[in-house]
Amino acid sequence: MATYRVLDPHGSVVATDDFDSAQEAHAWFVDNKADNSELGWRMEVEHDGEWSFFDDSEGTSE
């Protein structure tokens, strides 16, 4: 099981949860984005205490 988190376009963590598969985590990420047209949402996965890029909604808020 891995821990994933969703960050909004401003870099704030809006949700964190554990999943057995990357597919489940990705579906959760899509559900947590406030507005599918807003770019800059991203998802990270925790590994050995470090957060790493997993997916994004393309683009940034800057």
Image: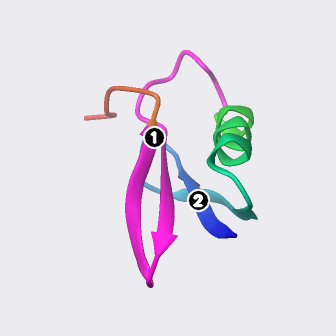
Foreground residue among 11 and 6: 6
Q: Secondary structure at mark 1?
A: strand
Q: Residue at x 44, y 48 (%)?
A: 54
Which x, y percent locates residue 2?
63, 68
What is the three-letter code of the residue carrying label 1?
Asp
Q: Residue at x 41, y 34 (%)?
A: 40
Which x, y percent locates residue 20?
74, 60
What is the three-letter code of the residue carrying label 2?
Arg
CB contact under 8 Å: marks 2 and 1: no
Q: Label 2: few (<14), some or many (≥20) within 10 Å?
A: many
Q: Residue at x 50, y 62 (%)?
A: 45
Q: Nearer the viewer, mark 2 or mark 1?
A: 1
Q: Which residue is mark 2?
A: 5
Q: Which residue is mark 1?
A: 55
Q: Give above or below for 5 relative to 43.
A: below
Distance from disc 2 to disc 1, alpha carbons, whole Å, reads 11 Å
Which x, y percent locates residue 39?
43, 25
10 on left or right of 28: left
Range shown magenta: 34-55
